[in-house]
Amino acid sequence: HGCPVMKPEAPGMSGVPDGLILWPIYAPRALTFVELKRPGKEERLLQAGVRDKWRARGCDVRNMCDTIDKVNALVAELRREAHAVAGV
C-alpha cells in the first residue's frame, strides 16, 4: 500500500502493539499503532490495557487485525482519513 510498517521494540514494556504504520505528512496522524494477530487469535488483556491507555493519551491505536482483509480495510480507512485532511 506504499506505507512502511514496522515492528516496534520496547524492552521492559509488555503489551506494546506490534505494528507501527508510518503515514505521509498530510495524514491526520503520522503514526498509527495496530495489534497484528494470526487468524482467530485474540488480543491479550494486557495488550487491550496498553491500547486503551495509549488512546487516552491521544495516540492513534487501532483495533487488532487478524486477517489480510482487516489489514486492507484499515489501510483503506487510514488512506481516506489522510485524503480528507489533505483535501484530495
Image (cartoon, rainbow, N blue to C red):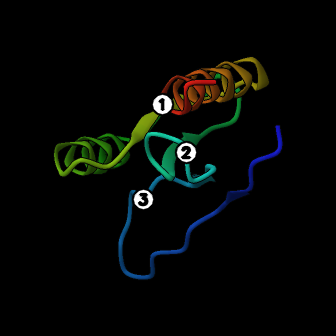
Q: Which sits in the foreground, 11 or 55?
A: 55
Q: In the rendering, at what x and y percent does residue 29 appear?
A: 44, 46
**72 lies left or right of 35:** right
Tell me the amino acid under the disc marked 3. Val
| Circle 1/circle 3 CB separation < 8 Å | no
Report the front residue among 6 and 38.
6
| Residue 76 percent across, percent down from the top left | 67, 22
Crowd band around label 2 with a 10 angstrom C-alpha radius: few (<14), some (14–19), many (20+)? some
Question: What mark, if any, has residue 26 been given in the picture?
Answer: 2
In the rendered structure, find residue 16 and report the number of the disc placed on it. Answer: 3
Q: Secondary structure at mark 1?
A: helix
Q: Is residue 53 left or right of residue 78?
A: left
Q: Residue at the location (50% across, 53% down)?
A: 30
Q: Residue furthest bottom?
A: 11
Element assignment for label 2: loop
Numbered mark located on residue 85 in the image = 1
Badge 1 density bin: few <14, some 14–19, many ≥20, Cα 10 Å: few
Q: Quadrant of the N terminus?
A: top right
Q: Which mark is residue 30?
A: none
Decide if residue 17 is on the left or right side of residue 80: left
The amino acid type, in three-letter code, at marker 2 is Tyr
Q: CA distance from mark 3 to mark 2?
A: 26 Å
For residue 72, which quarter of the picture? top right
In 3D space, how far apart are the residues under numbered discs 1 and 3 (Cα atoms)? 28 Å
